Image: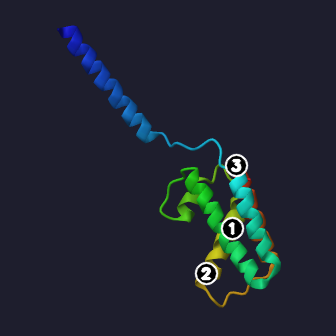
Amino acid sequence: MNTIIFLIAAIIFGLLVLFILSRLVVHRPRKLSQQYYQKKWLEILARVKTYDGMILAVIDADKLLDEALRKRSYRGKTMGERLVAAQHEISDNDAIWYAHKLRNRLVHEPTTRLRKNEAKQALAGVRQGLKDLGAL
């Protein structure tokens, strides 16, 4: 009788430990669908032929990077928080933050004028970030 109770207690304890460990470990998928992100990235690049297209390209590139961060299970209420969580995996954090801040200016400050070199710099930073996350 004592052996059965001990066995049941051990099983319950083991399940409890597994449950706690599963909550502590962040599960990151090993791979993102590179085919999906490559297709989206090419769609973004196709927009840069016009001024309005450049604006949309910067905004959509930022969204695509945020989507990759979410799929990789980086936690945070905002993209900024997710970028901080991913900073050790990103090779050029300054470039990512430049792109994200430019996106915020474009969205929240309607008088912001986007220069072509700013758009190129932002898109290059996001592209590298997507590579670092395994999306491209």
Amino acid of disc 1: Ala
Residue placed farthest to the left in the image? 1
Whole-percent x, y for residue 135 in the image? 69, 52
Residue 67 drawn above or below residue 21: below
- Res 115 label: none
Q: Circle 3 sits on which residue?
A: 134
Whole-percent x, y for residue 67 in the image? 59, 60
In which quarter of the view is residue 56 placed?
Answer: bottom right
Q: Measure the C-alpha gap from mark 2 to mark 1.
A: 13 Å
- Res 107 label: 2
The residue drawn where x is 72% and y is 73% is 57
- Res 61 label: 1
Quadrant where the N terminus lies?
top left
The residue drawn where x is 55% and y is 56% is 70
The residue drawn where x is 18% and y is 9% is 2
Identify the secondary structure beneath mark 2: helix
Label 2 neighbour load within 10 Å: few <14, some 14-19, many 20+: some
